[in-house]
Amino acid sequence: PTYKLIYFNARGRAEHIRYIFAYTGIEYTDERIPEELWPEYKDSMPYKKLPVLEVDGKPVAQADAVARYLARKYDLMGRNESDALICDVLVDTLEDLEQAICYCRMEEDPERKEARMNQLLNETIPLYLTKFDQIIGEYEGYIIPSTTTWADFVFAAALENFEYMFGASALDKYPALRALKKRIHRIPAISDWLIRRPYTNS
């Protein structure tokens, strides 16, 4: 099939899909829509959201659905259904954390924003990252022992964004998460992608 990934010029919700393409060596078109032109494209997209993957010209919505589709097709789901379930659970739980961060950042009232940020930094983020670190620490930086899965790419991309938002020391208390990110970024195909991808600040 031919693939076209449509998103903004950002890492955001599409970067783990780009990781999959880089890792598998599958050719695709990486179409990046300037934000000022988004209103012209919006109505033509399923559910009026991005990212969208066109498969032989047919648009498919939802970033994680797209990633799972590619993972099934290119053997990145783990070794069995149990592995696939673990990947799904961790990715969906990470999405809960990302939504909490987004919810906080979108708050406009200064007092409520400060209160939510304090809760986020002191309670929500440590709760999630500690649990993730414990799970991934059992397998020395792997979600599934000695097996690279699409969930590794989801976490590596999310952790890169996390460090960008909260600083380079944000993962100091979570050595297993940092190990996962470093392991993925050291894969030659991923390392090459990191060097040649367009620079973005999000």
Image: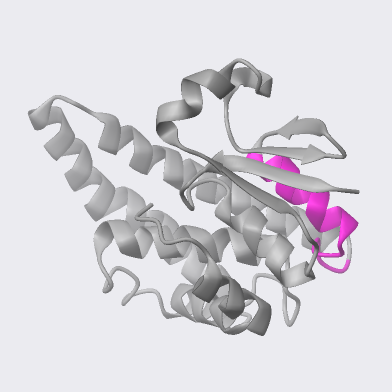
The residue shown at (77%, 38%) is 54
Q: Can you name the residue that lies furthest to the left here?
A: 111
Give the camera-side residue of 33 and 61. Answer: 33
Asked whether residue 105 is drawn in magenta, I would say: no
The residue shown at (24%, 53%) is 121
Q: In which quarter of the image is residue 127?
A: bottom left
Compared to residue 54, the image places residue 149 above or below, namely below
Which color scheme is applied?
one colour
Compared to residue 122, the image places residue 163 above or below, namely below
Q: Is the magenta stretch mostly helix, strand or loop?
A: helix
Q: Is residue 131 found left or right of 192 in the rendered image?
A: left
Give the camera-side residue of 162 and 127. Answer: 162
Q: Position of residue 9 (x, y in %)?
A: 47, 47
Q: Is residue 6 found left or right of 56 in the rendered image?
A: left
Q: Where is residue 41 in the image (x, y as percent from the top left)?
A: 57, 23
The residue shown at (28%, 72%) is 168
The residue shown at (68%, 45%) is 5
Q: Give the range drawn in magenta.
A: 63-79
Q: Quadrant of residue 153?
A: bottom right
Q: Is residue 82 found left or right of 116 in the rendered image?
A: right
Compared to residue 144, the image places residue 6 above or below, namely above
Q: Position of residue 7 (x, y in %)?
A: 57, 41
Compared to residue 134, the image places residue 82 above or below, namely above
Q: Position of residue 30 (x, y in %)?
A: 64, 51
Q: Can you name the residue that lies furthest to the top here?
A: 43
